[in-house]
């Protein structure tokens, strides 16, 4: 199976698994479950879970082995999007072309749906993920670290703190914000697949470097698209970063400079693949997809 077909296979199998998650059969909790499923089944590129599956494949494991952890990663990502859209954060009315969760179900339900995703993510790993006790514990540790203070949440805090600063932010701070905010969870997605496949420490280090640069490229391209695309193509507000004075790669480097930064991140990601044995064509293809995506 070539890499393109394999990615599609990952995505199809993952969507099937995600659709099967119900969380509760208690009718009294129906509104919460409805809001959660509305958010998690709204589409998206599924970069993180399919990266986890491809990483497992690269290191010799069946991609289906990691489905519970891949789903846990996507639930964490979905919770972050719900909370990012709230009025206290980015105050967005649309996500992926549909009303955001707080616009459809109210702010309280949106907050609680996001909170519930975190608990359900831990349940997926600790109850349903196959592996040695040491591997499962390492997966929990990896996911917790990438979403905590020195991960996704910390990056979001820095993003808020520097909103309004725009082009005044130094490059070191800009990179730190986005390595935490976006890069950390993408890095963990690749690492978790490698951990569960039994990859060596050296192999884990190489794929970590690849995925961190991939995450950085993903964020830079996001910044460029926000500045240059339309709401119709993005499925959410366009031009909002500049309106809020956010610290982005476009505000610091300009559009063309940001594109060069994305190219450099892609090159570093591809270079890291040279330290991984086996077929890395799928990981290479993912890097090119992220760099050249248009939405």
Image (cartoon, rainbow, N blue to C red):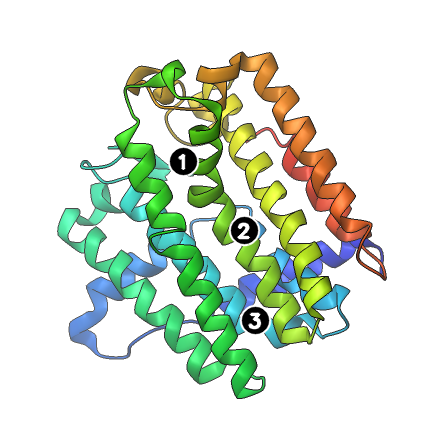
**Of residues 108 and 268, the one drawn nearer to the viewer in this rendering:** 268
Residue 168 in the image: above or below residue 194:
above
Single out the mark in the foreground, 2 or 1: 2
Q: Which residue is mark 3?
A: 67
Instruction: Tell me which corner region of the image, top left, top right, bottom left or bottom right, holds residue 267.
Output: top right
Q: Helix, strand or loop at disc 3?
A: helix
Question: Disc 1 and disc 3: Cα gap in Å?
Answer: 27 Å
Q: Which residue is mark 2?
A: 186
* Circle 1 Cα neighbour tier, 10 Å, few/some/many (<14 / 14–19 / ≥20): some
Q: Helix, strand or loop at disc 1?
A: loop
Question: Disc 2 and disc 1: Cα gap in Å?
Answer: 23 Å
Single out the mark in the foreground, 1 or 3: 3
Q: Quadrant of the N terminus?
A: bottom right
Question: Disc 2 and disc 3: Cα gap in Å?
Answer: 16 Å
User: Which residue is at 63% across, 28% downward?
Assistant: 262
Percent position (x, y) of residue 275? 80, 54
Q: Which residue is mark 1?
A: 97
Percent position (x, y) of residue 52? 61, 61
């Amino acid at each position: 199976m070539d890499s393109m077909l394999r990615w599609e296979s990952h995505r199809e199998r993952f969507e099937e698994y995600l659709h099967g998650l119900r969380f509760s059969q208690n009718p009294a909790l129906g509104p919460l479950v409805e809001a959660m499923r509305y958010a998690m089944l709204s589409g998206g590129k599924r970069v993180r879970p399919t990266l986890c599956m491809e990483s497992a494949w690269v290191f010799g494991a069946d991609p289906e082995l990691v489905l519970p952890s891949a789903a846990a990663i996507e639930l964490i990502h979905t919770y972050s999007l719900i909370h990012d859209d709230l009025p206290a954060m980015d105050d967005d009315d649309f996500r992926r072309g549909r009303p955001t969760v707080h616009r459809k179900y109210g702010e309280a339900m949106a907050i609680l749906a996001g909170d519930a995703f975190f608990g359900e993510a831990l349940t997926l790993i600790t109850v349903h993920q196959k592996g040695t006790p040491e591997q499962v514990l390492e997966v929990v540790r990896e996911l917790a670290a990438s979403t905590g203070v020195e991960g996704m949440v910390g990056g979001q805090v820095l993003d808020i703190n520097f909103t309004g600063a725009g082009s005044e932010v130094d490059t070191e701070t800009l990179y730190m914000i986005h390595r935490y905010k976006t890069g950390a969870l993408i890095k963990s997605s690749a690492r978790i697949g490698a951990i569960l496949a039994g990859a060596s420490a050296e192999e884990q280090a190489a794929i970590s470097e690849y995925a961190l640069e991939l995450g950085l490229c993903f964020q830079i391209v996001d910044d460029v698209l926000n500045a240059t695309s339309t709401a119709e193509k993005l499925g959410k507000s366009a031009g909002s970063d500049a309106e809020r004075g956010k610290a982005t790669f476009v505000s610091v480097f300009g559009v063309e400079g940001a594109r060069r930064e994305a190219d450099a991140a892609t090159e570093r990601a591809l270079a890291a693949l040279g330290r991984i044995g086996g077929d890395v064509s799928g990981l290479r293809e993912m890097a090119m997809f992220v760099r050249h995506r248009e939405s």
